[in-house]
Image: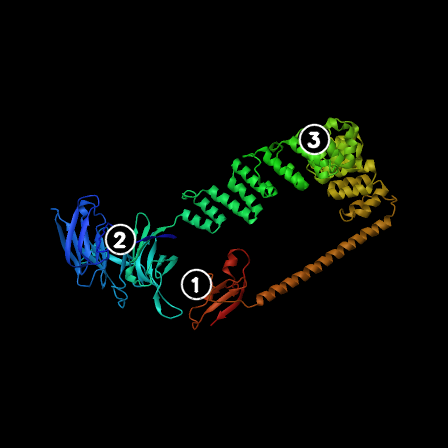
């Protein structure tokens, strides 16, 4: 927490002047006390025969029931007005030297004399505590005690270099009363400081300390009086943490002593008064406006803006917008034009007038390009002249940047005809510039001049022509240009209606085929149409399409293929629809291809299909040869051989039988090889498990018995013990394990047995 300090001059007065208010404590020697009301006729006047060191009035002196005050000198006297409007005095304390400090809060009076600090309860008329002085080597008149009340029951004491924080006044329990006061004091915290204390004041949960500082000169090595300090500290249990520290330059500080400084505070206003013989310094708590002032002074604009945004409800002298504008100006002065332009979005917000003002500022310094990416494009919308001014700036020096802005900015931000004319003027100088031509086509599109836009796209052979045609339904304009369109790009979006002329239908087929190869799902709604188009224009790609598409209607595809007598496609569709027997029959009867029939049976892996294939082939020797050569790995060849009629001549029968035997031998070898590998792996794993189980197991004081949950090793190393460790790494005291059964002497881990993981056997027994 920061403190703002200002200085007030204190003039020299001849004679003695006595000022007294409900907060003030006058520490001058005088023998006349006068108490009077500023706004009433009340007055008290008393002459003493001894010097008076200190005076304190009741905190609520204005009330008729609280007309009390105390004076301190050799004695502590309490003056109070009786019911007959007479003042009477009573001695509260005497005999321990001069009383130099008195603080009154609520019903408690605290004072300090040469011996220590006392607290008096005005209600019970009892002194409830005595806090002795710590450092008796310091003269009490040179280093007086500083007192302050944090609240009605919390007193803070500073004396010399010692701070007692906090002497909390508490109520005593009735059972502890006897002859003791009803209240007692408890010292919560106490710590030492590196300086002498001239004054104390509370600040929330922290302390404001006026410090008297002595330092040693490096040149003369003599001790001298340094400037007093005003510190804010955070009390801890046995020490303190310094929050802030300010050295005060007061006149004559070189000659001042610790007793010459005093600290008073105005509790309601958070004002602190540092009094010295020649100056009065007023300190007040810094607010967020002060903090922002400091940041702006140090040119920390970003931090100032952040602080203002966080505390916008508390700041009074600053506005977030003003700080933001100052921040933008600062960035511009530094040459950070891009950062300044980016900050405009947040700072200027929806203020169109400020946006326009900043744009003109950027124009003056030649940095329109820097602010262009951040201009608002809606809510707010600036004047068209602003956008046109930036577009002209790019058009003069950066065609690509100009094209980017035309693509990104909505066409209604500026006067389109003005920009079109500007582009045409530039094309007169560079008629083949593709960037300008494409941008002009986009401008024509914004202006709904689709004919000119289409002509430019066709001239440039640009793909955007198809997007233009589709978006604005320009099919009638391209019927005579369809071949030209497909000539320079056959992979564009299909734009032609389904009932178009055959040439356009072929275009559709080409496009849909390219689209399907790129993404099987993108044109799924056209898959039914693609079946007809493939059948008409591109049959080689029909079967791959049927295999890869998951969206085409199978019934429709089967109907088309059967009408056109596409056997291979019909076979695939029948098998895909689950009618594998009909598909196999078509292969054998229509294609007469035994290899394809065998391949189809292998793909389906259905025993009934193999049975149908054997029945169909049994009277066809070439088919039998094909089956004998390929059936061995899927069906038992005996089933086929038993059905061959005696006397039937089968081509290459010997070679087929030899191949069957070779396939059988190969299978036997494979099985034996797999068996050897399995045995070798099992043996290797068994050896690895044996090596693992033969390793030692670390047992230390961190391990516990899984049964009794106590440490596995005794705390006394000399005590004998017995431990059982299983291969599963569970450990038990031997006495915690159940006795082995009569049938088996082996012991097993109870935990692993209970979890059905297989019992582990004991691998180690430790005894001592």
Which residue was labeled with disc 3?
Answer: 470
Which residue was labeled with disc 2?
Answer: 153
Q: In this view, does 490 lie above or below 271?
A: above
User: Residue 594, percent across and down?
Assistant: 82, 42
User: Residue 546, percent across and down?
Assistant: 74, 37
Which residue was labeled with disc 1?
Answer: 710
User: Residue 738, percent across and down?
Assistant: 47, 62
* Disc 1 to disc 2: CB gap under 8 Å: no
- Quick one: SS at disc 3? helix
Q: Is residue 102 above or below residue 628?
A: below
Give the residue drawn at x 47%, y 42%: 322
Residue 616 sits in quarter: top right
- Quick one: SS at disc 1? loop
* Disc 1 to disc 3: CB gap under 8 Å: no
User: Residue 660, percent across and down?
Assistant: 81, 51
- The Cα atoms of the two marked residues, 1 and 2, are separated by 52 Å
Q: How crowded is mark 3: few (under 14 residues within 10 Å), some or many (20 or more)?
A: some
- Quick one: SS at disc 2? loop
Q: Is residue 599 visible?
A: yes
Q: Nearer the viewer, residue 186 or 16?
A: 16
Lower sequence index among marks 1 and 2: 2
Residue 98 sits in quarter: bottom left
Q: Can residue 497 be seen in this view?
A: no
Which residue is outermost to the left? Answer: 84
- The Cα atoms of the two marked residues, 1 and 3, are separated by 81 Å
Lower sequence index among marks 3 and 2: 2
Q: Residues within 10 Å of mark 1 (few under 14, many from 20)?
A: some
Give the foreground label among 1 and 2. Answer: 2
- The Cα atoms of the two marked residues, 3 and 2, are separated by 85 Å
Q: Which of 180 and 613 is in front in this view?
A: 180
């Amino acid at each position: 927490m920061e403190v703002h300090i200002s200085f007030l001059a204190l003039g020299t007065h001849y004679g003695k002047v006595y000022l007294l208010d409900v907060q003030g404590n006058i520490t001058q020697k005088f023998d006349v006390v006068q108490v009077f009301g500023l706004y009433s006729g009340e007055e008290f006047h008393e002459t003493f025969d001894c010097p008076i060191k200190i005076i304190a009035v009741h905190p609520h002196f204005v009330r008729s029931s609280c007309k009390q005050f105390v004076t301190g000198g050799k004695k502590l006297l309490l003056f109070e007005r009786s019911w007959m409007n007479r003042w009477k005095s009573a001695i509260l304390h005497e005999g321990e030297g001069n009383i130099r400090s008195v603080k009154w809060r609520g019903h408690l009076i605290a004072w300090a004399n040469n011996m220590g600090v006392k607290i008096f309860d005005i209600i019970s008329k009892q002194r409830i505590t005595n806090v002795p002085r710590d450092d008796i080597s310091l003269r009490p008149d040179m280093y007086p005690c500083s007192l302050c009340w944090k609240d009605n029951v919390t007193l803070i004491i500073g004396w010399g270099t010692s701070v007692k924080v906090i002497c909390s006044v508490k109520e005593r329990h009735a059972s502890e009363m006897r002859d003791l006061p009803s209240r007692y004091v408890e010292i919560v915290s106490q710590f030492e400081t590196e300086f002498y204390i001239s004054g104390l004041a509370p600040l929330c949960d922290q302390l404001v300390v006026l410090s008297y500082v002595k330092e040693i000169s490096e040149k003369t090595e003599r001790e001298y009086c340094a400037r007093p300090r005003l510190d804010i500290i955070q009390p801890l249990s046995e020490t303190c943490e310094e929050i802030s520290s300010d050295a005060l330059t007061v006149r004559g500080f070189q000659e001042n002593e610790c007793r010459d400084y005093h600290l008073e505070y105005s509790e309601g206003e958070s004002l602190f008064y540092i009094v010295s013989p020649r100056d009065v310094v007023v300190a007040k708590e810094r607010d967020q406006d002060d903090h922002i002032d400091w940041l702006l002074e140090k040119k920390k604009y970003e931090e100032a803006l952040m602080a203002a945004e966080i505390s916008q409800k508390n700041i009074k002298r600053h506005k977030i917008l003003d700080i933001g504008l100052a921040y933008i100006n600062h960035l511009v002065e530094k040459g950070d034009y891009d950062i300044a332009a980016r900050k405009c979005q947040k700072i200027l917000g929806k203020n169109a007038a400020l946006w326009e003002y900043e744009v003109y500022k950027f124009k003056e310094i030649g940095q329109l390009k820097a602010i262009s990416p951040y201009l608002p494009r809606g809510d707010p919308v600036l004047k068209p002249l602003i956008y046109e001014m930036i577009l002209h700036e790019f058009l003069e020096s950066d065609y690509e940047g100009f094209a980017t802005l035309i693509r990104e900015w909505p066409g209604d931000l500026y006067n389109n005809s003005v920009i079109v004319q500007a582009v045409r003027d530039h094309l007169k100088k560079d008629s083949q510039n593709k960037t300008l031509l494409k941008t002009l086509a986009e401008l024509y599109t914004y202006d709904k001049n689709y004919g000119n836009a289409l002509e430019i796209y066709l001239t440039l052979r640009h793909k955007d022509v198809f997007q233009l045609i589709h978006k604005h339904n320009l099919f009638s304009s391209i019927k005579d240009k369809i071949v030209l369109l497909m000539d320079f790009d056959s992979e564009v979006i299909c734009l032609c209606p389904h009932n178009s002329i055959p040439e356009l239908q072929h275009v559709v087929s080409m496009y849909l085929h390219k689209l399907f190869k790129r993404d099987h799902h993108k044109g799924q709604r056209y898959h039914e149409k693609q079946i007809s188009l493939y059948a008409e224009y591109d049959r080689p790609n029909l079967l791959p399409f049927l295999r890869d598409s998951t969206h085409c209607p199978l019934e429709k595809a089967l109907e088309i293929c059967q009408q056109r007598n596409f056997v291979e496609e019909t076979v695939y569709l029948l098998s895909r629809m689950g009618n594998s027997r009909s598909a196999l029959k078509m292969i054998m009867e229509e294609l007469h291809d035994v290899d394809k029939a065998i391949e189809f049976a292998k793909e389906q892996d259905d025993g009934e299909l193999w049975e149908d294939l054997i029945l169909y082939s049994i009277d066809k020797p070439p088919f039998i040869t094909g089956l004998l050569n390929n059936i061995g790995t899927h069906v038992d060849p005996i089933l086929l051989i038993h059905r061959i009629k005696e006397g039937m001549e089968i081509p290459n029968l010997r070679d087929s039988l030899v191949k069957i035997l070779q396939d059988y031998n190969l299978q036997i070898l494979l099985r034996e090889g797999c068996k050897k590998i399995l045995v070798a792996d099992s043996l290797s794993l068994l050896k690895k498990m044996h090596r693992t189980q033969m390793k030692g197991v670390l047992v230390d004081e961190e391990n516990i018995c899984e049964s009794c949950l106590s440490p596995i090793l005794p705390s006394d190393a000399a005590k004998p013990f017995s431990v059982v460790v299983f291969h599963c790494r569970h450990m038990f005291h031997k006495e915690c394990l159940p006795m082995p059964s009569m049938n088996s002497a082996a012991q097993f881990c109870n935990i692993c047995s209970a979890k059905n993981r297989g019992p582990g056997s004991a691998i180690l027994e430790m005894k001592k």
